[in-house]
Amino acid sequence: MKVFFDNCTSPVFAGSLNALIQPDGDQAHHVRFMSAFGFAHDTKDVDWITKLGADNANWIVVTGDGRIRKNLAERAAWIRAGLKGFVLAPAYQKTPLHQCASILLWRWPEMKTFIASAAPGSMFELPINRRPGGFVTLAVK
């Protein structure tokens, strides 16, 4: 499994999660450090969505940008790509980086299990707490 973090997230999230999941054969990447995919800091959402969808890997997206599900072009690309992902709750914007990273690491096992059974093209809000569950389905269609 591969986890993709977009530009609306800190590269610290990808690096921290990667250190945790790499021993299990999984990987976490931030868009800024994916030049092998042709990505850079200014890669448009439609472009990374399309490219990840065309890749034969099992990608999970973590973003801080809930607008993906509202922008017509991005939403259409997301559905076509069949990606699954989590949108960070707005509270992540006001919380210190180290606390956000710790919550992602804490919740990772549950996120991985939960998203495995989700339908392609689905998106869920990731609350900023350590309580089990609470993933809110976000309408994409």
Image (cartoon, helix red, strand yellow):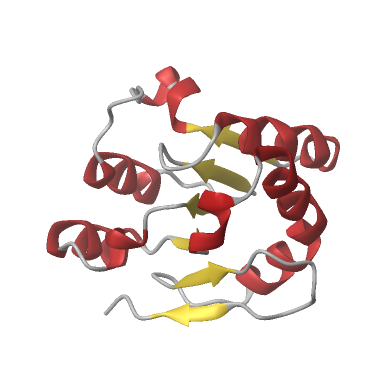
**Location of residue 16 in the rendering, given as x and y in whole percent from the top left corner:** 73, 34
Percent x, y for residue 3? 58, 46
Q: Quadrant of the C terminus?
A: bottom left
Image position of 50 with respect to 112: above or below: above
Q: How many marks?
A: 0
Q: Residue furthest right?
A: 23
Q: Is residue 93 above or below residue 126?
A: above
**Residue 45 position within the rendered picture, expressed as x and y whole percent measured from the top left:** 27, 44
Seen at 14% across and 64% down, the residue is 72
The reply to whether residue 88 is in sight is no
10 relative position to 51: left or right? right
Q: Is residue 50 visible?
A: yes
- The residue sitting at 32% across, 40% down in the picture is 48
Judge left or right: residue 33 versus residue 19.
left
Residue extending furthest toward the top: 35
Extreme-left residue of the structure: 72
Residue 28 screen position, x and y as percent: 63, 38
Residue 136 image-quadrant placement: bottom right
129 left or right of 41 in image: right
What residue sits 43% from the left and 73% below the top?
122
Which residue occupies 79% across, 32% down? 19
Image height of 53 relative to 72, above or below: above
Q: Is residue 92 left or right of residue 134?
A: left
